[in-house]
Image (cartoon, rainbow, N blue to C red):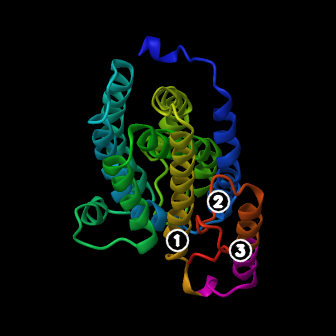
Amino acid sequence: MGAMYELSPNPTWVDSLHGYVKPYWDALLNGDFAKGVSSAQLTVPEMQGWILQTYPFIHAFPKFLAEALIKVEDDYSRAFLIDNIRVEKAHAEHWIWMGMGFGLKREEMLDLAEGNKPVLRDVQSLTDWLWYINTKGSLAEAVAATSFGIEGMTGDLARKVVAGFESYRGRPGVEMGPKTYKWMREHSEYDDVHPKIALEIIKRYATTERMQMRVMLAAKRSIQLLDQALHVGYQAYTPADGLLGPSTEKRAADRRSDRRVIAQLLPFPDRRFADRRGRARRAVA
């Protein structure tokens, strides 16, 4: 992909994009999930939980990209998506290796991906959103939600948490070999480049202020749903004796507080709705 790495200068609105998603990006990167994995504070059952629950999303990821590929109108974007589909197909198998390293069985992961067992609601919401935006959204929105939002966020997460894996070596049921690291290690490399190329595609297709606003919303939505999916994915497997401890209550209170702060930081581009004839604004549920 030689020419892919020749990146163009960013127009001013891209700074707004980065600024708009930054609070949500930072909340996930510095939140309970990332801290728990990077410091090995999550229990082995909690590690198994988020790996298992997230696998159907990882399994479907190349299909999201394939839906976006249908919308492409230029060779640059087409080459990137085709190459990315190839890469992500291999990475689905690497995720299974990671799960097996933490004591999961291949069969139980495939059962979830094939729909034989349901995933948690908030995890399913992430998959549903990526299906929707890649099939019904514009190419700029689809790439912002998928290759910029999810892959970009995943790259930063992988670089932060992979060091914590070594601390799980020797715990009951864990086999920490090269295959266990492979998904995280490769995403810390691939997903440093892919979001930059994705941004090139977004700049080509988001040529109006309205579309640029929709791109911001799509990227933010993906990051929010990924945050929720990972959090719920491990918390649902928290051992019973850890559910109501003071530290858990404090984390929940801190999380609610963080969300209130984030909501106040950058309201753009969320809209308020008003009657066009000048009547008083009313709250919209």
- Residue picked out by circle 1: 232
Q: Position of residue 143 (x, y in %)?
A: 44, 39
Mark 3 and mark 1: Cα distance apart in space: 14 Å
Q: Please give the label number shown on residue 40.
A: 2
The residue depicted at 31 percent of the width and 51 percent of the height is 60
Residue 244 drawn in magenta: yes
How would you rate the neighbour count of disc 2 (Cα within 10 Å): few for under 14, some for 14-19, many for 20 or more?
some
Query: From mark 3 to mark 2, how far is it between C-alphas?
Result: 23 Å
SS at circle 2: loop
In reply to whether residue 43 is colored magenta, the answer given is: no
Give the amino acid at mark 2: Ala
Q: Nearer the viewer, mark 3 or mark 2?
A: 3
Residue 56: image x %, image y %?
Answer: 33, 58
- 3 vs 1, front mark: 3
Label 1 residue SS: helix
- What span is colored magenta in the figure? 241-254
- Among the 4 quarters of the image, the one containing residue 140: top left
Which of the image's four quarters has the C terminus?
Answer: bottom right
Q: Position of 50 compared to 209: left or right?
A: left
Establish if 275 lies above or below 265: below
* Numbered-mark total: 3
Image quadrant assignment for residue 81? top left
